Amino acid sequence: MLAKFWDPRTARILCTALTFALILAFLHTAEETLTLFLFAILFAYFVEPLVSRLERPLHGRVKAIVVVYLILVAVLVGIGFLVGPRIANEGRSLATSLPTLVDRMGSGQLVSQIGQKHGWSEVRQVQIQGLLVAHRSDILRYGQALGGKLAEPAQHIWWLILIPILSLFFLKDGLSIATGMINLGRNLEEKTTIRGIVGDINVMLGSYIRAQLILAFLTVVSYTLVLSLMRVPYAFILGPLAGIFEFVPVVGPALASVIVFVIAVLTSYPHLVWLFVFLGAWRLVQDYVNAPRIMGKSLEIPPIVQIFGVLAGGEIAGVVGAFISVPVIATLRILWRRMTSDRSVDAPATSTLSPNQK
């Protein structure tokens, strides 16, 4: 009688669904902790090439890690002495004047000032002023919402200390972690599959992080240098900000360009046409020259999927979620491809973080 009500196949499906539900609930509950560890892993991938290169000459991985960290600290201190004071001054100035500039824009006062500089007719100025005044509450609300989103990372400023500390463990014990994951397989076939997954994720994350860092560095240098030469206000703030947004595929660079242009408009910058030309030209160079050469096919994810991932990640975990969404999607793609493949590729048992570690 009990067999009529108990179907093993149905029970397995229900158990699987329940397991996934519990996993999703755990991910939602431990969202900040998991995000912190993900950033630690990404930082470990950032410094791993230099650690591996110094490991043999220094006769030890721990010595190489210490030297790399000392180099990073020295570089950061040097940059701080060179441009730190100017960045701090521009940051304070922008934070102080931005509410006033947004209010001027919403009231229409800024339109009159810009219109007089560019020779707009009074009719056009009145039309634009009327449009801005009619939507003043919406402009202020969206401005406050955007400011809140951009300020979210500041709430996790203490992560700047925790991330390098946690990365030490991944750099030091990367091979042990990878080996432990492979040994979770119950038989040779499962171990081969896990080994392939670990190898694919290792290659993907390493290529992606290094490519993104190079692209972000190019953006920081280009924006800061060109905006300074063009005398755009707050160039030493806008340049690094554009570099940070470069880590958010597709959506981030576009948003950075909009922010730069809006700040220029709010500060009554006189050469808006040339600024627009530079922003458009740099995106063409970055997207069609630099990115294909540097990024290659490390992700193999269509742009529409990247946009969906960024928007979904931002909705789930704010700015932090937008940053890590694409690597997470690429990892899930690797897992799905490996688990549904008819045959497993026997990849070498390398560490996720330290392929040269012994």
Image (spheres, grey):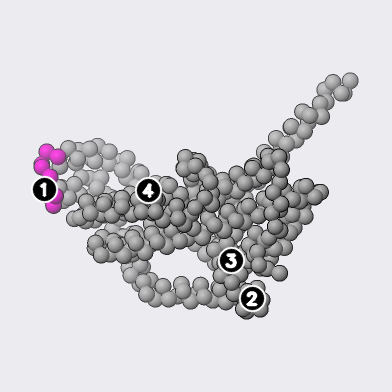
Q: Secondary structure at mark 3?
A: helix
**Residue 296, how many percent across, how many down?**
49, 52
> Is residue 28 on the magenta stretch?
no
**Residue 118 lies in magenta, yes or no?**
yes
- Whether the residues at callouts 3 and 4 have beta carbons within 8 Å, the answer is no
Residue identified by numbered label 3: 48
Could you tell me how far apart the alpha carbons at marks 1 and 2 are, in whole angstroms? 66 Å
Q: Main secondary structure of the magenta part?
A: helix
How packed mark 3 is, by other alpha carbons closer than 10 Å (few <14, some 14-19, many 20 or more), is: many
189 vs 268, left or right, is: right
Q: In the drawing, does residue 234 fall left or right of residue 247?
A: left
- Which residue is disc 1 drawn over? 119
Q: Nearer the viewer, mark 3 or mark 4?
A: 3
Q: Amino acid at mark 2?
A: Arg
Q: Earlier in the sequence, mark 1 or mark 2?
A: 2
Residue at 14% over, 50% down: 118
The answer to which of marks 4 and 1 sits earlier in the sequence is: 1
Q: CA distance from mark 4 to mark 1?
A: 29 Å
Which is closer to the viewer, label 1 or label 3? 3
